[in-house]
Amino acid sequence: MATVSVALVTDSTAYLPDDLRSRPGISVVPLHVILGGQEHQEGVDVTPDEVAAALRAYKPVSTSRPAPQAFLDAYRKAADQGAEAVVSVHISSALSSTIGGAELAAAESPIPVTVVDSRALGMVMGYAVESGADLAAGGASAEQVADHVRRRCAASSIVFYVDTLEHLRRGGRIGKASALFGSALAIKPILTLSDGAIVPLEKVRTTSRAIARLEEISADRIAAAVSDGKGVDVAIHHLDSSERAEALAERLRARVGEAGQVMVGELGAVVGAHVGPGTIAVAVCPKVD
């Protein structure tokens, strides 16, 4: 197997599918989830179903970033496997202090590390890591890979419906969406990320209408990307709402056609702990040169 000179490291909130997690040149550092006082590693020893059950039962659920040593271990492993540099891509610094641990580790790494704040989460990061790894495999430099990752993340968007704002409020991730609380009992919020922070996009009265608007917004963004001619990849993330997610994905596949892929993946424990069961999110990720 040929050695990849630029390795990609990301964290577990990218929610990479198994085929990407196991791809040579890509590694994932797990964030931590605390359930009932017990610490777990996301994607290793705690499942989204366990988090959803705890949230439904109103049991304490919290999250924390990896220790810098976990990132340093990933960078050293990349060096041991022959990489000459690392591009390390992580969840928005407006949502988590994860990137701080990566930066501390980068200073101790045996090979150069470029740390990228995705200003995003989920497969907005994941698709950027995938196409960055494709570039690296073709011989691109770390600078070229990092630039591509930044541009693809910036071109992408994620919009999500949550059943309740309560979990975001408890976790302190509510940001400008706190403005919705005055009528929180009467609305179903549609949220998005703006400059890496959670902000309200629309207020809708019913779940069915919220899902319909989620589809309409996503379809418009897909159409814009397809018309640009470069293609688009889409991911439907959910927590404890697989049937709704699969149905939405099937409808959006008709919009994407041959221009890219549409995947469905469950939100992991970390993001799930903040958005709660019933959440549906759509990441629309245009391809970039």
Image: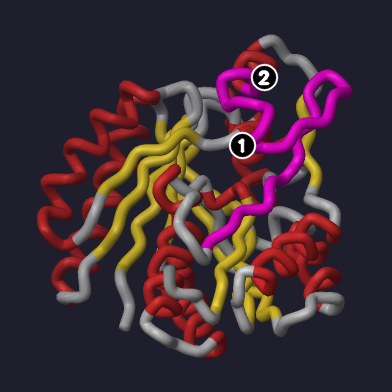
Where does residue 200 sit, x and y in percent of width and height?
Answer: 53, 49
Name the amino acid, label 2: Leu
Where does residue 186 sit, x and y in percent of width and height?
Answer: 52, 25
Spot the residue most to the top.
57
Relative side of 197 to 239, left or right:
right
Q: Are marks 2 and 1 in contact (CB under 8 Å)?
A: no
Q: Is residue 40 magenta?
A: yes
Name the amino acid, label 1: Gly
Q: Residue placed at 37% from the left, 82% from the top?
A: 138
Q: Residue placed at 61% from the left, 36% from the top?
A: 43
| Marked residue nearer the N-terminal end (2 or 1) | 1
**Which of the image's four quarters has the N terminus?**
bottom left
The residue stretch that appears in magenta:
26-51
| Crowd class of label 2 (few under 14; some 14 to 19; many from 20; radius 10 Å) | many
Q: Secondary structure at mark 2?
A: helix
Q: Which residue is mark 2?
A: 55
Image position of 189 with respect to 75: above or below: above
| Crowd class of label 1 (few under 14; some 14 to 19; many from 20; radius 10 Å) | some
